Image (cartoon, helix red, strand yellow):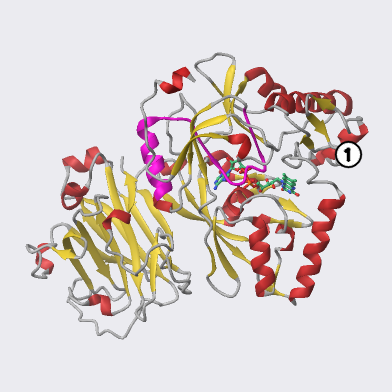
Amino acid sequence: MQAQAQMPDLSLPCPFEREVILAEKSYYRIGGRTRFFALPDTVRHIGDLLLWNREHRLPLVVMGSGSNMLFSDEPFPGVVISMERMNRMFWLSPDELFCEAGVENTAIAAELLEKGRSGGEWLHLLPGCIGSTIRMNARCFGGEVAAVTASVAVMDLGGRIRWVPGDDVFLGYKQTSLMESREIVLAAVLRFCCSKPSPEIRKAMDCHEKERHDRHHFDFPSCGSTFKNNYDAGRSSGMIFEELGFKGCREGDAKVSEHHANFIFNTGRASSGDVLALAARMRRAAREKAGVDLDLEVECTGLFPGDVLDACGVPYVPAISPECRGWAGLLWSPGEHVHERGAANGFPRTLLQGYLTGYSGKDLVFPPDIGVHVEQLLPLADAAENPGYPFLQWTTLARSGALAGSRVVQKQPGGIPGDFTDGLWNHPVSELFIGSGGAGAGYLEFEMRPSGDWVALRFSGPRMRDPVSGALSAALWEESVQRFLCREGGFGMTFSFGLLRPLIEHGVLSLQCAASLGNECFGLFPWWHPDAEKTDFHQPGRFFRLALR
Ligand SMILES: Cc1cc2nc3c(=O)[nH]c(=O)nc-3n(C[C@H](O)[C@H](O)[C@H](O)COP(=O)(O)OP(=O)(O)OC[C@H]3O[C@@H](n4cnc5c(N)ncnc54)[C@H](O)[C@@H]3O)c2cc1C
């Protein structure tokens, strides 16, 4: 406690609480105090938090409902990011449900019941939120989240966002790419193609509810199954532990369920040490007496004795101090580099890639196939030496033709077609805003249509057109902006480093992709929270801040 009192009084760039007892937040009712408990309610908040932590380097972890996390009893000297306020859910089409990561599984099942959509009955009373359920590839009663997930929006530790097809996320039984990549799930599009009368859906949900109660799942706090199944064993982990006589075994207040030998209950004041001591005994017995190797399903989170983690087969990052301890289950552990993985390390480097979502505040159905991709083409150091080179590339793909329109295109011989036109926003148009992140700061706006028509505007503050570029003219932008049209119907622009340099502060740039279809129909990527009162993209303080390299 004394050491903590001496720490500087930091403040997080999003809603948060200090000194929160994790036992009060987790299903298991186990866990020490965390220095910070962050409660982001926008994508921007999460990005800002990750940027902030590049500087402060505190241990970092993300949680949903904590129904699969065993927190250490030791104080956690970092930030626990709770996704509970990221809980927006709406239909993109009759089959496709957009859910932010913090939407509870049971709430999704209730939504499906209301709309008469089948395929998610099994989510009813599955503890947890959809983001973590995807991360765990959870399954029960013949349902598996992999089977209903069309795509997943993820953010890496560098704050970059992309939508990933479900097939690239799910790797098999209780395995996902997210376990390795340590990306944060922001949202998902779930697909439910089958309709059914609501009474039939209700019946299936009631059946699952009864089964969970009959199996005494909720008698005491737990994390559900402690170990994954090993399918080579030919029987479930629960059956193996039952054969080995573990039902009712205890370690302190941690006790193996009398009804399901793979559940370890907290029957009172069990510590994480009690649970892991019991789990270690079970794992050893499974190996020595039944010849079966089992992996823990429960995610140990925080600082634990290394020998305990070893006994449970949990990977960890050795702590520098105190020795013999290890950090487990974190997005980032002290001593680790904030790394980016694989091909993402090179250039061009994706900063944002995804689909526009109906503007917040109105659950408008926005065509789900308007995609944008913003890439950094050169490292900052190279760009500084070549300020005239293209540095940032913005591409829009609109397969449905939603951005097409009746505007007459003037062909310029030899060049890319399209006029430089004021008032382009009266037509369906894709837009990119580039700022420095300050709420009252200046920013640039680019608009472009599949026809090649475009406009570029400079603002000195929200909706305040800069008098210097008040005269609209392509000539002002000729040296720093290049347009392109792609064969697949995409279109976009590149921007030189020289143009953007004044907006880059400490290596950070703010971006906001938008599109207007007319008829008050707007889309955004990254999306905002529905607290926005009116559809106004010109809020540079809400653009998404990204670290360049
Ligand atoms: C009584 C009981 C019964 C259960 N029955 C089942 C069952 O039948 N089938 C089954 O599969 N599971 C079951 N579980 C386990 C649990 O319900 C699932 O694993 C659930 O998906 C976890 O959701 P959560 O929000 O509580 O995740 P958490 O416990 O909060 O997190 C789980 C993991 O995901 C990470 N995480 C959290 N949010 C994110 C995010 N947004 N992005 C990336 N990573 C994230 C965490 O760091 C942690 O590593 C049961 C649990 C209990 C308590």
Label 1 crowd (10 A; few <14 / some 14-19 / many >=20): some
Picture quarter with the C terminus:
top left
Q: Amino acid at mark 1?
A: Met
Disc 1 marks which residue?
239
Q: Nearer the viewer, residue 479 or 131?
A: 131
Query: Where are the magenta residues, as a range?
Result: 45-72
Residue 207 in view of the camera:
yes
Q: Quadrant of ligand 1?
A: top right
Which element is circle 1 on? helix
Residue at 17% x, 53% y is 499
Residue 486 in view of the camera:
no
Relative vertical location of residue 321 with respect to residue 461 in this rendering, above or below: above
Q: Quadrant of residue 356?
A: bottom left
| Image spot of residue 151 (x, y percent) | 55, 59
Relative vertical location of residue 507 with respect to residue 433 in this rendering, above or below: above
| Image spot of residue 53 (x, y percent) | 39, 35
Residue at 34% x, 70% y is 535
| Image spot of residue 508 (x, y percent) | 28, 44
Q: Quadrant of residue 303?
A: top right
- Say left or right for 92 vs 45: right
- Say left or right for 200 vs 323: right
Toward the top, the furthest residue is 323
Q: Nearer the viewer, residue 288 or 264?
A: 264
| Image spot of residue 234 (x, y percent) | 87, 41
Q: Is residue 71 magenta?
A: yes
